[in-house]
């Protein structure tokens, strides 16, 4: 597996709508076989970003956190790739990840894994690792209204690209809604 880091870029997204728009723009660059790992605290916007990716890919079904079912497959409504959305929060070992058989569906789908750091890197050397953070004070320790206000507030999004597949990815253009390149293309 390749692990050639292409670079890391951080952008700020003003709210949940901007996070979804970023996901839609990113979806224009995704193709079957791509792995996207999402990391961030509770309420940081991992599922919100995945909703945007799902909308951009044109998949069936509401994209919601798969916390209790671990993984959901959203088939394409067109001839594009399906979206496999995984929540690895409750998975503690590589054996549990292997039991999901993600590598079997990887080539036919776009796979987005929340909480997958340290567990899924080995299934695809070329991948995007996206870390979402909310400003200090806007975390689950900030009070009971934190999750109720998940739609508002700035998110800091750091995208680290691994592998030649992602050479030239313009994260800043994605954050400003740029989706000039067609599906599956980069840059």
Image (cartoon, helix red, strand yellow):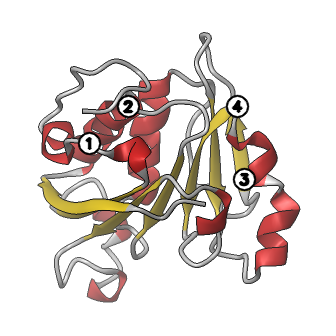
Circle 1: is it few (<14), some (14-19), or many (20+) Cα within 10 Å? some
Rounded to the nearest angstrom, the CA distance separating label 1 from label 2 is 9 Å
Q: Which mark is residue 108?
A: 4
Secondary structure beneath disc 1? Answer: loop
> For the point 72% across and 53% down, which residue is it?
71
Circle 2: is it few (<14), some (14-19), or many (20+) Cα within 10 Å? many
Which is nearer the N-term, disc 1 or disc 2? Answer: 2
Q: Which mark is residue 169?
A: 1
Secondary structure beneath disc 2? Answer: loop
Asked if disc 4 and disc 1 are in contact, CB closer than 8 Å, the reply is no
119 or 90, nearer to the observer: 119
Where is residue 104 drawn, in percent x and y?
Answer: 81, 45
Rounded to the nearest angstrom, the CA distance separating label 4 from label 3 is 16 Å
Q: Which mark is residue 29?
A: 2
Question: Which mark is nearer the camera, 1 or 3?
Answer: 1
Asked if disc 4 and disc 3 are in contact, CB closer than 8 Å, the reply is no
> For the point 62% across and 11% down, which residue is it?
79
Secondary structure beneath disc 3? Answer: strand
186 or 15, nearer to the observer: 186
Question: Which mark is nearer the camera, 4 or 3?
Answer: 4
Secondary structure beneath disc 4? Answer: loop
Say which quadrant the N terminus sits in: bottom right
| Residue occupied by mark 3 | 71
């Amino acid at each position: 597996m390749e692990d050639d880091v292409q670079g890391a870029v951080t952008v700020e997204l003003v709210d949940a709508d901007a996070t979804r728009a970023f996901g839609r723009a990113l979806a224009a660059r995704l193709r079957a076989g791509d792995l996207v790992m999402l990391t961030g605290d509770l309420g940081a916007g991992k599922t919100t970003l995945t909703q945007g990716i799902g909308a951009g890919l044109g998949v069936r079904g509401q994209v919601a956190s798969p916390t209790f079912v671990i993984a959901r497959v959203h088939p394409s409504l067109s001839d594009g790739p399906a979206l496999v959305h995984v929540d690895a929060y409750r998975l503690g070992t590589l054996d549990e990840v292997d039991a999901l058989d993600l590598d079997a569906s990887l080539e036919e789908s776009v796979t987005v894994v929340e909480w997958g750091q340290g567990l899924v890197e080995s299934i695809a050397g070329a991948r995007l690792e996206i870390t979402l953070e909310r400003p200090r004070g806007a975390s689950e320790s900030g009070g009971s209204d934190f999750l109720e206000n998940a739609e508002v507030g700035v998110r800091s999004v750091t995208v680290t690209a691994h592998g030649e597949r992602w050479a030239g990815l313009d994260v800043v253009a994605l954050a400003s809604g740029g989706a000039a390149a067609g599906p599956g293309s980069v840059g």
